[in-house]
Amino acid sequence: MYKDICGGKYRVYSDGRVESLISGIFLKPDVQKLGYYQVTLFDEDGKKFRKKVHRLVAECFIPNPDKLPFINHKDGDKTNNSVENLEWCTSYWNNLHARTTGLNNISKSNSDRWNNPEFRAKASRSMSIAAAVKRDNMNGRVNPNFRYNLRYKGEIYTIKELSELFGFDQSKGFRLARRLREGRPCEWTGIVEYA
């Protein structure tokens, strides 16, 4: 089974092969950095573009009534682009499939990295440097949980601290900080500054 694309210049087969009808030969796909096969094609206007083979096959042979954006390789083999091995899916399903089949084991890879003494030392150094910079910017206090700091009567406060001081909830504090940062007027203009 096949379908012609690009104004009849190419033919895509359901097993994942792509044939040039101009030269009469099957295109040899390149392996992309992430392991997917891709081919270089020319559209009807002669403009060159690259396309992943599994996307070509899915677009030609698999209906997508829900307009799902991702294509999953059912067996996990990125080089097996036959129509029977492909399905349209959501990002959530694609990631879940990768984790359940062991193709993407984030916990294991993170664990392996932290077991490496060189990585642990480098990461600890980087975190220490970042904490020192943050401490210098906050007069010796580290507060990694809040993105915004506000100045009131010459002192720097986090949103949480300022919210407790004036008795309003933190969501109002975030809105206040955003307005001050963007230079928009609010009831606190002139009293509190974005730091």
Image: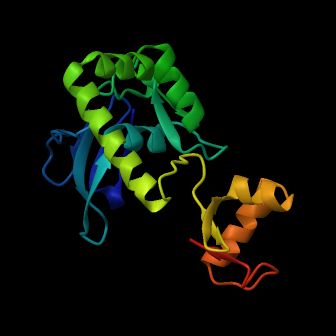
**Quadrant housing residue 169:** bottom right
Q: Quadrant of residue 89?
A: top right
Picture residue at 51% right of the left edge, 15% below the top: 100
Query: Which one is in front, 22 or 66?
Result: 66
In this rendering, does residue 74 appear at all?
A: no
In the image, residue 97 above or below residue 61: above
Q: Residue furthest right?
A: 167
Q: Position of residue 3 (x, y in %)?
A: 39, 44
Look at the picture and state if 22 lies above or below 112. Answer: below
Pinpoint residue 179: horizontal percent, then vertical percent: 69, 76
Residue at position x 15%, y 46% from top? 24
- Pick the front one: 79 or 24: 79
Q: Position of residue 192 (x, y in %)?
A: 70, 75
* Above/below status of 84 relative to 186: above
- For the N terminus, give its image quadrant: top left
Taking the spot 31% from the left edge, 67% from the top edge, the residue there is 44
Q: Residue at x 30, y 22 (%)?
A: 113
